[in-house]
Amino acid sequence: MNEACSRLGVRPQTIYAYVSRGKVEVMSDPADTRRSLYRAEDIAALARRKQAGRKHETLAANTLFGAEPSIPTAISTFVRERLYYRGQDAVALAATATIEEVARLLWDAEQPVDFSSTARAGKPGRVAAFRTLATLAATGHSTHGRMTHVLHLEAQSLVGKLANAFGAQPGQHPLHLRFAQGWKQPPKAGELLRTAMVLLVDHELTSSAFAARIAASTGASLPACLLAGLTTLSGPLHGDASGRVRALFNEAERQGEDQVIAHYLSTGMPLPGFGHHLYPEGDPRAAALLAMFEPPKTIARLIGKASGLTGLQPNLDVALAALVAHCGLPDDAAFAMFATARSIGLLAHSLEQLGVGQVIRPRGRYVGVMPAGASAR
């Protein structure tokens, strides 16, 4: 750890964050299980990138050659460790706005957005949601040659159907209330769902937003764009990270928070859901959501002790998993909320990409065996 910190000029918390994001591979030291070994190649790559000193503003727009691709967007951004949707503070919006109002803002729609849907899923959940979306993608129409207001109508229909497939009650109520009804929750819990979903709508150019934009750049249908984004979102290092946090909470319930935290820290493994590279001082989205309810006692103690021992604050994945436990929601409810809310942002990126009129086509840098007879240049 000390060598890695020295090489990169960072604190241990930053190394933990790199590990949690999959940028640095870690394993236990065979000679001393209390120590961790970090992959030298990963540390070296981060050091080279740090020395290069490239900033977002200096990377050529639309290039994928740099370590961080830069694509112009007016949908969301970060300013002083705060998230903004089209210039409006996301946390402030979450205090009162509905998911429908935020969708209208992100889509820059002229008319109010309505996620009403009568579609019913035989067995609501992740399988039903992806099956519904895949069927729509297989029969969807290209986005080319279609008016924006028509695409907005299709987009809101997609979100409504996706929500129902994840377990929302079919009907005409606002989306957060339909989820509360589908999960047999009181209106008070609906407010928590509303807040969480507004905070989840977008997070600038994530890997899932990038995937959706690539699909959109080819003229793929809106359901195909959304499917591309959501399959990327489903990874445990992205939108399904709350599943790892839920597993952590379950361990704490069985073994006690002290033993679980000690195990993670003694082996050098980062605690899932703590720390965020974009919010070094703490994720404001998580703070806003956690302030609205009291997590179960074991979870509350784990959050407090983990933060005290690591200096890392809980991120939104912890807040979501704690919300699920607090309300007694279905096990996959965190991903259902994340995927449904983020579908709004993914569709916003898809619609924005249509205005570029250029296929996103990166070039590969071949590092394999050269063909026989080929001459090096």
Image (cartoon, rainbow, N blue to C red):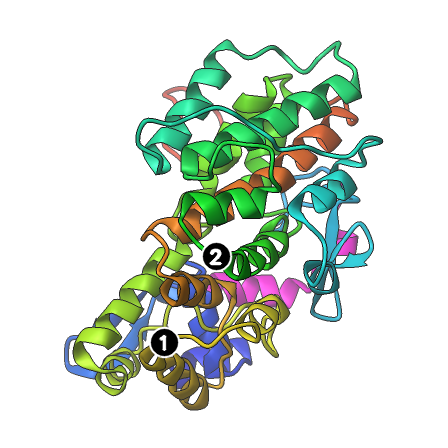
The crowding category of the residue bearing disc 2, from other C-alpha atoms within 10 Å (few below 14, some 14 to 19, many at least 20), is few
Q: Considering only vertical position in the picture, is 74 above or below 133?
A: below
Q: Considering only vertical position in the picture, is 224 above or below 71?
A: above
Residue 199, horizontal then vertical, whole percent: 62, 57
Find residue 3 and name its label: none
Q: Amino acid at mark 1?
A: Pro
Say which of 190 and 377 sits in front: 190
Residue lying furthest front: 186
Name the residue beneath numbered marker 1.
296
Between the C-alphas of marks 2 and 1, the distance is 18 Å
Residue 8, horizontal then vertical, whole percent: 52, 75
Looking at the rendering, the stretch of residues picked out in magenta corresponds to 44-61
338 vs 84, left or right, is: left
358 vs 324, left or right, is: right
The crowding category of the residue bearing disc 1, from other C-alpha atoms within 10 Å (few below 14, some 14 to 19, many at least 20), is few
Of mark 2 and mark 1, the one earlier in the sequence is: 2
Q: Considering only vertical position in the picture, is 142 above or below 42?
A: above
Classify residue 298 by image quadrant.
bottom left
Name the residue beneath numbered marker 2.
186
87 vs 354, left or right, is: right
Q: Considering only vertical position in the picture, is 49 above or below 8?
A: above
Residue at 49% across / 17% down in the picture? Answer: 136
Residue 316, horizontal then vertical, whole percent: 52, 64
Residue 197, horizontal then vertical, whole percent: 57, 52
The N terminus lies in which quarter of the figure? bottom left
Residue 49 on the magenta segment: yes
